[in-house]
Amino acid sequence: MSRMQTETLLRRVQTGDADALDALVREYYPQILNYCRWHVPDAQQAQDAAQETFYKAVRWLDGCGGFAGQFRPFLYKIAKNICADWHRASARDGPALESLPEEPGYQEAGFDQTEDALSLRALTARLDPETRELVLLRFGQQLKLREIAQVTGLPMRTVQSRLRAALKILKNQLEQEELP
């Protein structure tokens, strides 16, 4: 979906057009759900986080006079905050036994339907959380560097240099694993 199409839909959502909201959700929900599933281990809670992302986005649109910026990074920023809230609550309360997943819930959009997702998860587990987030946004969610900078609040050059450093680390890990 082009930026102009998205902006048109956003204006229509602000006027109460339910069809426009449906179109936005159809376009972006699989990506946001995929992102939430990387951060929230329980599939149902990840779905709840994705739905809450859209709820908060629509509430924000209702409360403002317009939308400046790109919608996709805006959604990821909301999802990031919701997932962070979930982690804080989980750390405080401890995981409920029924919320522990039997197997990873990576069944939705993108490359997560392959074993590449498990390999990426295993490789990135050794990275610090901030760098892992950058790798996920770039390679798991296919966000542009500019969008990653908007989501994380980092300067674009910082995003570039941290991704470059992460790729070197991941390359070294892969080379070490290939050695007999």
Image: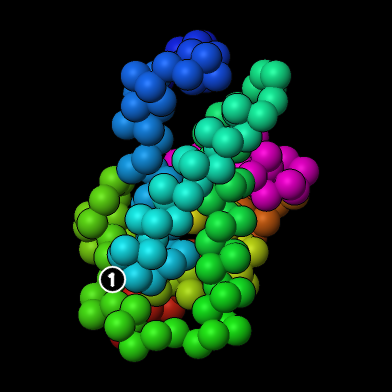
| Residue at x-position 55% and y-position 19% | 14
Above or below — where is 53 with respect to 22?
A: below
**Residue 69 place in picture, x, y as percent:** 66, 25
Residue occupied by mark 1: 104
Above or below — where is 149 with respect to 122?
A: above
Of residues 31 and 86, the one nearer the viewer is: 86
- The stretch in magenta equals 139-157
Of residues 84 and 52, the one nearer the viewer is: 52
Residue 178 appears left or right of 50? left
Where the N terminus falls, by quadrant? top left
**Residue 177 place in picture, x, y as percent:** 37, 78
| Residue at x-position 40% and y-position 57% | 48
**Residue 10 place in picture, x, y as percent:** 52, 19
Tell me if mark 1 has few (under 14), some (14-19) or many (20+) residues whose alpha carbon lies within 10 angstroms of its own. few
Residue 55 appears left or right of 63? left
Q: Magenta span has 63? A: no
Question: Which element is circle 1 on?
Answer: loop
